[in-house]
Amino acid sequence: MKKQWLPIAVFSLLVAFLAIGLTLNPKAVPSPLIGKPAPDFTLPLLNQQTAFSPQQLRGQVWLLNVWASWCSSCQQEHRLLVRFAQNRTLTMVGLNYKDTPNEAQAWLDALGNPYSFVVEDQNGQAGIDWGVYGVPETFVVDAAGIIRHKFTGPLTQQRLDNELLPLLNTLEMTQ
């Protein structure tokens, strides 16, 4: 008799876990890299012969924004990043993720380029090292090269005002 209830109990347990999972915010997935040194990479700058490495930015607070021309959420976020770059002096690195240089350049030419540097990550390896599982994602790196925060999904004005700007102000004061 007890064996007859076992499939029902297992099914009920699975339904309960699914229901709990559906209530979670996918943007709230914590990064295991928070509080750890930013992964290093050396990648070519977009349509240039020179390379970039995060080590070049030691001693300053900076952002890494992972984006792609094929990403519709990136286009939504990009307008905000352009305005942000016009109003704030901060090094912002664009990591062009799994994209072609020509499409990335055309996208920047059409929408504006808020980045101090744009690096090509055509095979996505640097993105994997940084724990990227979708675009856009934005990382805040402190002057010591430690990742302090990760924004999953597009930045909004509210997230910029309530989370990013206060964090940048704090990090820049301790610099």
Image (spheres, rainbow, N blue to C red):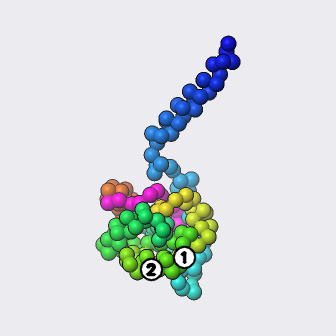
Q: Which mark is residue 100?
A: 1
Quarter of the image containing the N terminus?
A: top right
| Callout 1: SS | loop
**Residue 150 belongs to magenta span:** yes
- Which segment is the magenta one? 142-157
- Indicate whether 4 appears above or below 49: above
Front residue of 58 and 93: 93
The three-letter amino acid code for the residue at tag 2 is: Ala
Graded by Cα atoms within 10 Å as few (under 14), some (14 to 19) or many (20 or more), the crowding at tag 2 reads few
Q: Which residue is mark 2?
A: 106
Front residue of 84 and 149: 84
Q: Residue at x 46, y 56 (%)?
A: 152
The percent coordinates of residue 33 (x first, y second) are: 56, 57
**Residue 123 belongs to magenta span:** no
- Indicate whether 58 appears above or below 102: above
Residue 136 at least partly seen: yes
The three-letter amino acid code for the residue at tag 1 is: Thr
The percent coordinates of residue 160 (x first, y second) are: 35, 60
Picture mark count = 2
